[in-house]
Image: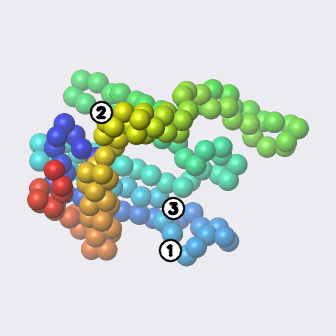
């Protein structure tokens, strides 16, 4: 996660394995929190889990909340427009709202291929993300925050 050109200085991660069922593989995390600290003092937290019930229609919600000094901004990529029960199918019914993000991502990729422009996110973004993920796993192994030097992350 890159904030206005700034790269994280420290990464700290914690997980739990509370949601296990008969079919789950032992040792698979059911929830995790990764905290990124930036040199400017900004702190970003990524909170993820697999806690949706099996009948939930998407693989997980994608929401973002940004808390600032003067405002809070919330974003929901999969807004729920209709929630109820489908008696014919005997299961919950959920109708998503908003744009088809998979289609938008595919169209952006194809447009980049057609025009020769750089696809976004680019390979550098992927490498930075991988380095943060590896630092998070190191933090999990040690139980301590992991310092990232700027030369460890690609620029």
SS class, disc 3 = loop
Q: Is residue 63 visible from the viewing direction of this image?
A: no
Residue 58 placement: quadrant = top right
Q: Which residue is mark 2?
A: 67
Residue drawn at the location 41% of the way across and 63% of the way down: 15
In-front residue for pair 78/87: 78
Residue drawn at the location 18% of the way across and 57% of the way down: 153
Q: Earlier in the sequence, mark 3 or mark 2?
A: 3
Q: Which mark is residue 27?
A: 1
What is the x, y in percent for residue 79?
A: 55, 30
Q: Which residue is mark 3?
A: 30
Please say if the residues under marks 3 and 1 sit with CB atoms less than 8 Å apart: no
Please say if the residues under marks 3 and 2 sit with CB atoms less than 8 Å apart: no
Spatial CA distance of label 3 from label 1 is: 9 Å
What is the x, y in percent for residue 100?
A: 56, 32
SS class, disc 2 = strand
């Amino acid at each position: 996660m890159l904030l206005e050109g700034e790269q994280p200085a420290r990464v700290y991660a914690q997980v739990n394995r509370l949601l296990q069922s008969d079919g789950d593989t032992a040792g698979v995390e059911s929830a995790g929190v990764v905290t990124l600290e930036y040199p400017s003092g900004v702190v970003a937290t990524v909170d993820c889990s697999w806690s949706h019930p099996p009948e939930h229609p998407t693989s997980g919600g994608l929401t973002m909340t940004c808390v600032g000094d003067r405002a809070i901004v919330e974003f929901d990529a999969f807004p729920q427009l209709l929630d109820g029960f489908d008696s014919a199918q005997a299961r919950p019914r959920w109708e998503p709202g908003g744009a088809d993000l998979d289609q938008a991502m595919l169209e952006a990729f194809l447009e980049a291929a057609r025009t020769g422009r750089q696809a976004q996110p680019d390979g550098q973004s992927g490498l930075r993300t991988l380095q943060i993920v590896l630092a998070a796993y190191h933090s999990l192994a040690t139980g301590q925050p992991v310092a990232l030097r700027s030369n460890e992350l690609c620029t």
